[in-house]
Image (tube, rainbow, N blue to C red):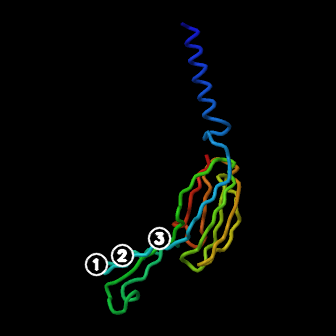
């Protein structure tokens, strides 16, 4: 009877070790590519009162066109907008070779870089202009959160690449 328990325990441990493989995620590192758009989301209304606080004072990523400036014919109409990466959340396996194909949809210029989990630069800053694609590559050498950042529209325009 005890032999049977040892055998079953050995099989279970073997299956667990096989499932875990060489990395904590159970998968081997490889090549990963993400298509990321740099976009602006806008909303206009004349159905509610304009905000009491200018949204641009809250974040460099916010834009605001107050009543009277947005539509000279409709003094109640106003607009807000913000910039963001889409997608803004991605995941990779530690050791993956990561390719980010970034396309500027909105905004004349974005200064973009990638910070590693330890705060060092995984990718130095580059400028991405509207209608242009820029390809950034790095190896996810550390576990943790890599931050995709735009210096022109921080802190609202930030992406997270989780390396496990």
Q: Which label belongs to residue 58?
A: 3
Q: CA distance from mark 3 to mark 1?
A: 23 Å
**Foreground pick, 155 / 111:** 111
Label 3, residues with CA under 10 Å away: few <14, some 14-19, many ≥20: few
Residue 162 shows in this picture:
yes
- The residue tagged with tag 3: helix, strand or loop? loop
In this rendering, the answer to whether 101 lies above or below 96 is below
Label 2, residues with CA under 10 Å away: few <14, some 14-19, many ≥20: few
Front tag of 2 and 1: 1
Residue at the spot of label 1: 47
How many marks do you count on the picture? 3
In this rendering, the answer to whether 69 lies above or below 124 is below
Pinpoint residue 10: horizontal percent, then vertical percent.
61, 19
- The residue tagged with tag 1: helix, strand or loop? loop
Q: CA distance from mark 2 to mark 3?
A: 12 Å
* In the image: residue 77, left or right of residue 85: left
Residue 121 shows in this picture:
no
Pinpoint residue 19: horizontal percent, then vertical percent.
60, 34
Q: CA distance from mark 2 to mark 1?
A: 15 Å
**Foreground pick, 160 / 135:** 135
Q: Are marks 3 and 1 in contact (CB under 8 Å)?
A: no
In this rendering, the answer to whether 54 lies above or below 71 is above
Q: Earlier in the sequence, mark 2 or mark 1?
A: 1
Residue at the spot of label 2: 52
Quadrant position of residue 3 = top right
Residue at the extreme left of the image, as rendered: 47
Q: Quadrant of the N terminus?
A: top right
Q: Are marks 2 and 3 in contact (CB under 8 Å)?
A: no
* In the image: residue 130, left or right of residue 55: right
């Amino acid at each position: 009877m005890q032999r049977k328990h040892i055998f079953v325990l050995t099989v279970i441990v073997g299956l667990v070790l096989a499932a875990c493989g060489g990395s904590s995620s159970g998968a081997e590192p490889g090549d990963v590519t993400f298509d990321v758009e740099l976009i602006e989301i806008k909303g206009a209304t004349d159905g509610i009162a304009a905000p009491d606080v200018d949204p641009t004072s809250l974040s460099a990523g916010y834009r605001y066109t107050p009543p009277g400036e947005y539509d000279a014919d409709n003094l109640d109409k106003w607009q807000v907008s913000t910039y963001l990466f889409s997608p803004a959340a991605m995941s990779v396996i530690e050791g993956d070779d990561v390719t980010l194909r970034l396309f500027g949809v909105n905004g004349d210029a974005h200064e973009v870089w990638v910070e590693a989990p330890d705060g060092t630069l995984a990718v130095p800053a580059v400028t991405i202009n509207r209608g242009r694609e820029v390809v950034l590559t790095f190896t996810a050498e550390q576990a943790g959160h890599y931050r995709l950042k735009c210096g022109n529209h921080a802190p609202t325009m930030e992406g997270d690449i989780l390396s496990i």
